[in-house]
Amino acid sequence: MQQQRRQPELVEGNLPVFVFPTELIFYADDQSTHKQVLTLYNPYEFALKFKVLCTTPNKYAVVDATGAVKPQCCVDIVIRHRDVRATHYGAIDKFRLQVSEQSQRKALGRKEIIATLLPSAKEPPQQKEEEEKRIKEHLSESVFFEQTLCQPGKNRPASSGPSLLTVFLGIVCIAALMLPTLGEMESLVPLYLHLSVNQKLVAAYVLGLITMVILKT
């Protein structure tokens, strides 16, 4: 019975694809926007494999342009704009994220994401509204190409590593987790250095965030 309920969803091209965001806007004067992340969600009870296609693959570097998503999990796809120049301002590119079941080759679903390079985020409101309207009206058929795989150490820019502040906060969190918990009597550590369970949970949470930051740099 379960297989009969699931089968209609697996018709080629009809499977809904859940990805966020659905629009990428890069600003030439803001280098932090030159790298953006697409998050692909898999709410289904079966694994999906995905492939990222692009109308202009030479302008972008996509980390892990192909891969798989476990059931009820998500995966981040990093997209970097590597050709930021004035001649590309206002140009509308498209990414197509297509998914399929791991045991099949046919695309079960696809989602298109618009990508645009703008000169600055500080544009006048009227000009920004006109640009957004033009992007939404860009519904013409596009030709997509497979994205060149981004090899570690080749297309990725050299990483400068985590900042000193990040490392310092990580050390502080580790030290906090090593301190005794309130209520522990047999300890040589002064009582004012004993932390509550909630304080240790906060330290563990912050340490987890810092670890993610360090891994991404």
Image (cartoon, rainbow, N blue to C red):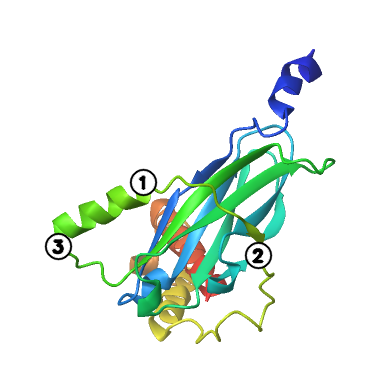
Q: CA distance from mark 2 to mark 1?
A: 24 Å
Going from N to C along the chain, the mark reached first, 2 or 3, is: 3
> What percent of the width, then of the height, locates residue 215?
57, 72
| Residue 168 seen anywhere in this rendered image of the structure | yes
20 or 96: which is nearer to us? Answer: 96
Q: How many residues crowd around disc 3 within 10 Å: few (fewer than 14), some, or many (20 or more)?
A: few
- Residue 180 visible in the displayed image: no
Residue 128 location in percent, x, y? 22, 57
Give the amino acid at mark 1.
Answer: Lys
To which residue does mark 2 refer?
147
Kindly indicate the quadrant of the structure image that contains residue 143: bottom right
Q: Residue furthest right?
A: 103
Location of residue 170 with respect to 132 vertically, above or below? below
Dot placed on the residue nearer the N-terminal end, 1 or 3: 3
Quick one: which residue is furthest to the front in this view? Answer: 140
Q: Are marks 2 and 3 in contact (CB under 8 Å)?
A: no
Instruction: Between residue 28 and residue 178, name the one nearer to us.
Output: 28
Q: Position of residue 65 (x, y in %)?
A: 66, 61
Relative to 190, is 147 on the left or the right?
right
Q: In the structure shown, which secondary structural element does the residue marked by tag 2 occupy?
A: loop
Q: Which residue is mark 1?
A: 136
Q: What amino acid is found at the position of numbered circle 3 in the picture?
A: Pro
Q: Which residue is mark 3?
A: 124
Q: Is residue 55 left or right of residue 124?
A: right
Instruction: Confirm or deny contact between disc 1 and disc 3 (CB under 8 A).
Output: no
In this view, the residue in front, 30 or 147, is 147
Q: Kindly state the secondary structure of the residue where label 1 is placed.
A: helix
Residue at the location (62% across, 80% down)?
155
